[in-house]
Image: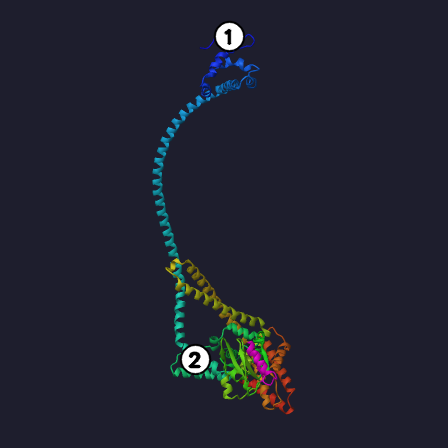
Amino acid sequence: KLESTQQDPERPCPKPSWGDSLKLMAQGGLLNSLVNFPKDTINEETVELMKPYIDMEDYNYDNAKKVCGNVAGLCSWTKAMVMFFGINKEVLPLKDNLLIQEKKLQSAMSDLNSAQAQLDSKQRELDAVQAEYDKAMKGKQDLMDDADRCKRKMDTASTLINGLGGEKTRWTNQSKEFMEQIGRLVGDVLMGSAFLSYCGPFNQEFRQMLLKKWQKEMKSRKIPYNIDLNLIDMLVEATTIADWSLQGLPNDELSVQNGIIVTSATRYPLLIDPQTQGKTWVRNKEANKELQITSLNHKYFRTHLEDALSLGRPMLIEDIGEDLDPALDNVLEKNFIKVGKTLKVKVGDKECDVMPGFMLYLTTKMPNPVYTPEISAKSSIIDFTVTMKGLEDQLLGRVILTEKSELESDRVKLIEDVTNNKKTMKELEDNLLYRLTSTQGSLVEDESLITVLQTTKRTSDEVNEKLKVAAETSIMINTAREEFRPVATRGSILYFLIVEMSQVNCMYQTSLKQFLGCFDLSMERSKKSPITIKRINNIIEYLSFEVFRYTVRGLYEEHKILFTLLVALKIDLQSKK
């Protein structure tokens, strides 16, 4: 039972009831009741009753602590409850609203779950329909891809048919030609081998006679061969001939044949070279390979030979006679001994290494030497003596270079272009045939093959067109060249007449170099004319008089009339008068 409250006369509050307070604090569950105090039950009336106490100056923790620590705690707790009420007064409506909103949320979540379940059901239906759609679209795309693939194959097949159809005629003809060539190969190779082995010592006319005789012999023995066989085309490329021409080899047929024998024969060449044209060519050809030039009577001949062998250098032995140094026997016969990977040869009583790159050339200025069968067997004797026809071709080349240099450059360029075009065609055809034979699977699936075929066909058409133009240009160039042949013919006649004068007197010797100087001088000093025929006549007249004057100056008086008569007769014979 609590005592009734009484107003404190000194303070604006009831008197404290310490007796009741002590009883309340003496209870064992005070702290528990404070901790679990129903804070939400505090109302305005309770706070209003507490306000006088709260407003007192001495109602604070510090003053209460001076009296008792427990009282100080209760003081702080009461103040906290009042403060809590002030805050809780604003929070309670929010809590009520929270409960309302939570109920609404639960209702909304229930609706959401229902809607989500319905959505999941519809999504499953949509996924099933989408799967069917994707499957149908994939089938459609596969059909489109198949259609595109079939279309590409059809286009490729059409391109392949058109491309190979265009090549069919040519390949069929080439196949027949190749079969015919294979059938004639034995005879052609026999002719080429016989030419390299036996034609070297003879002049142009005798070589032609030999070739005709061999053809007749093969025909009688029923050995197939090519009637129109061109040995030069068979044994050497046009570009190589052009290189030889730049190195100083005359471009007539005899000189080109001699160049083939020099470079292709198995034996070392021995050049019969009175006019030194062959020697000049060899020196220019081997100049960048440290050519060793010597002679049999040179005091260091053996040393030069040993150095050339051991260092792998070409060697030129000039001005040999009809006999050779015995030290050359083993070299000429190629009696090489293989020791490991090195070849050795015995030179006299000394063994020398034979290094790659060694080449031996022998030259003589004797116009008609007589060599023993042994020397003929050891070496490849080649006659570089200038013939009338050969000199005529050489002089024609000099005339064209002087008078129509653009024609000669066009002719050389034409030969190079034709050679390059044929080489390009050969490479493209080889590549195409390789792709056709090496392609795995279907040809129509190899798009790179179609690209190669198109490139080959396009290039083939271009090359064929260029070859037609080249053939027409070649005819024009040759026609233009032939206009100046009378000049070359007159020069050739005059030179060989001068050479024949040595039979009258051995003192009448004139070198080809001297004559060529006189020939060039005649073209330079003769009267110019824009009309070709007139220009040719001017050169011939000046050349004839200049050579006559140059030659007569060195003749005895009694022989001048003879020379004049021979000049007139030779010119009339050539003119068929």
Q: Is mark 2 on a helix, strand or loop?
A: helix
Nearest-to-viewer mark from 2 and 1: 1
Q: In this view, does 475 lie above or below 63?
A: below
Q: In this view, does 158 lie above or below 31?
A: below
- Front residue of 527 and 22: 22
* Residue 427 in the image, given as x and y percentages of width and height: 46, 66
Q: Is residue 274 above or below residue 443?
A: below
Label 1 CA crowd tier, 10 Å (few <14, some 14–19, many 20+): few
* Residue 461 in the image, given as x and y percentages of width and height: 45, 64
Q: Pointer 1: what residue? A: 6
Q: Which residue is drawn at 45% across and 17% down?
A: 27
- Mark 2 to mark 1 CA distance (whole Å): 158 Å
409 left or right, relative to 465: right
Label 2 CA crowd tier, 10 Å (few <14, some 14–19, many 20+): some
| Image color mode | rainbow
Query: What label sits on residue 553 in the rendered view?
Result: none
Question: Which quadrant of the figure contains the N terminus?
Answer: top left
| Bounds of the magenta segment | 295-319
448 left or right, relative to 313: left
* Residue 84 in the image, given as x and y percentages of width and height: 50, 20
Q: Would you say residue 478 is visible in this rendering?
A: no
- Front residue of 440 and 40: 40
Q: Pointer 2: what residue? A: 190
When asked about the image quadrant of residue 397, the answer is bottom right
Q: Is mark 1 on a helix, strand or loop?
A: loop
Amino acid type, mark 2: Leu
When asked about the image quadrant of residue 560, the answer is bottom right
When asked about the image quadrant of residue 279, the answer is bottom right
Question: Which quadrant of the figure contains the C terminus?
Answer: bottom right
